[in-house]
Image (spheres, rainbow, N blue to C red):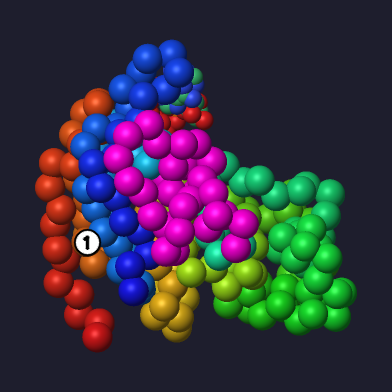
Amino acid sequence: GLLVGMEQIGKIYPNGTVAVQNVNLRVGEGEFLCFVGPSGCGKSTIFNMIAGLTGHTSGRLSVLGTTPKEARKMNEIAFVFQEHTLLPWSKLIDNVTMPLTLRGVPKKERIREGERVLELVGLKDYLKVLPRQLSGGMKMRVSIARALISRPKLLLMDEPFGALDEITRQSLQDELLNIWRQDRKMTVLFITHNVFEAAFLSTRVVVMTPRPGKIADILEIPTPFP
Ligand code: ADP
Ligand code: ADP
């Protein structure tokens, strides 16, 4: 099915900044799409509109078959940012299960799901560790685990690996692809400045123009994986 449908989407911020203009894009179930383009071209704005965090000011936008605001309430959209939004004084298991705690999910189920996602990112032996004891790459794994705990249909990643060293970045790219291949219904939208990263990860690359953000081109990346 269609996960995200953008028709002539535009965004003008209240201060008059034209951030996005005439964007047309359809994203299907199970795609892995990367967004590349210079700083300020509107990539984060597009993500925030899809996530229902800011409204579009023109065009039509559907997310998970409904409006972004309604889609947001369904808990099927998850976000991962470059900066870690982990609670420094909470154990990893408490950090990753936070979305479930907020929704009142019983403890037994929370722990089971927490262990599941920490295992997915290779951190099952770290349940009781505090984030401040971890490297940047490991903290990113925890952020990904927390995003996955609600089994999102749509995973939005805004330059998640931008602050990591090259070796760590490459292993996280591999791990992310493995996770995505295990759940081929999950759609990933991924912002990066790194063209190699985009080509390696995605099935399509959306190239944005300098501001105001328009789509300059959409590149289909042949993937060796069925
Ligand atoms: P990015 O890494 O995507 O380039 P920015 O540094 O441009 O991010 O923006 C960081 C935050 O500041 C975002 O939440 C964005 O909405 C906000 N922001 C960016 N530019 C402006 C602006 N001109 N006025 C108000 N807020 C802004
Ligand atoms: P990118 O993610 O590609 O770096 P952004 O979506 O963050 O781009 O920003 C697109 C444009 O919108 C930039 O000119 C930025 O300064 C502006 N902008 C972003 N957020 C805000 C905001 N909250 N208020 C006003 N302008 C903003």
Position of residue 118 measured from the top left corner of the image (x, y, whole percent) = 66, 73
Q: Residue at x 77, y 62 (%)?
A: 103
Give the residue displayed 45% in from the left and 80% down from the top. 183
Q: Secondary structure at mark 1?
A: strand
Instruction: Residue 34 in the image: state x and y as whole percent.
Output: 30, 55
78 vs 116: above or below: above
- Decide if ligand 2 comes within 8 Å of the CB at mark 1: no
Q: Nearer the viewer, residue 77 or 199?
A: 77
Q: Tell how many labels.
A: 1
Given residues 151 and 6, the one toward you in this image is 6
Q: Position of residue 43 (x, y in %)?
A: 35, 39
Q: Which residues are magenta?
A: 47-74
In this image, 54 relative to 193: left or right?
right
- Where, quadrant-wise, is the N terminus in this rendering? bottom left
Mark 1 closeness class: few <14, some 14–19, many ≥20 residues within 10 Å = many
Asked where in the image residue 97 lies, by quadrant, the reply is bottom right
Q: Any magenta on residue 72?
A: yes
Is residue 154 or residue 174 the one in the foreground? Answer: 154
Q: Residue 5, can we see it? A: yes
Q: Quadrant of the C terminus?
A: bottom left
What residue lies at 45% left-to-right and 83% top-to-bottom?
182
Which residue in the structure is indicated by mark 1?
204
| Towards the viewer: 32 or 91 | 32
Does the magenta-highlighted stretch encompass residue 87? no
Q: Would residue 87 be found to the left or right of residue 174 on screen?
A: right
* Amino acid bearing label 1: Arg
Height in image: 5 above or below 174? above
Which residue is at the far right? Answer: 107
Residue 168 in sight here: no
Q: Locate residue 94, reporting x and y percent.
A: 80, 62
